[in-house]
Image (cartoon, rainbow, N blue to C red):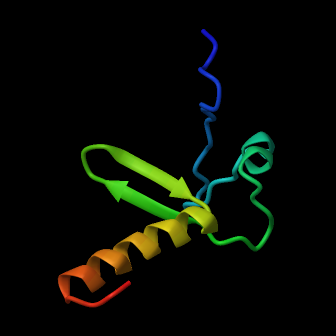
Amino acid sequence: MKAPPGKYMWSVKVGEKGQIVLPKEARQVFDIKPGDKLLLLGDAKRGMAIINSHGFKLFTDAAFSLLNKKEGQDE
């Protein structure tokens, strides 16, 4: 079965030190370069997700926006 456009799935193997290697195609699709920082998010029931620095920026911007609203500050 072919995945819907824009949806991907790869498998990775966890090494002895807990490291994984991102497949070349995944690095190309998501423009991940050596030295890039990635954020690993986890939920005990739903699993894990990896986001790149752009996704991390969107995540932190949203989090700080919510904090500022709670504190009554402008964005």
Q: Is residue 28 above or below residue 64?
A: above
- Residue at screen point 39% across, 70% down: 62
Quadrant for the N terminus in the image? top right
- Residue extending furthest top? 1
Q: Is residue 15 left or right of residue 61?
A: right
Image quadrant in which you'd find residue 35: bottom right
Closest to the observer: 1 or 75? 75
Closest to the observer: 18 or 56? 56
Image quadrant in which you'd find residue 64: bottom left
Q: Where is residue 58 in the image (x, y as percent from the top left)?
A: 50, 67
Across the whole image, how many numbered discs are drawn on residues? 0
- Residue at screen point 61% across, 62% down: 52
Quadrant for the C terminus in the image? bottom left
Q: Position of residue 13 (x, y in %)?
A: 61, 44
- Residue at screen point 20% across, 88% down: 72
Q: In this view, does 62 lie to the left or right of 28?
A: left
Q: In this view, does 54 lie to the left or right of 66?
A: right
Q: Is residue 65 above or below residue 29?
A: below
- Residue extending furthest front? 74
Q: Where is residue 55 in the image (x, y as percent from the top left)?
A: 55, 62
Closest to the observer: 3 or 60? 60
Closest to the observer: 21 or 1? 1
Q: Where is residue 29 in the image (x, y as percent from the top left)?
A: 75, 44
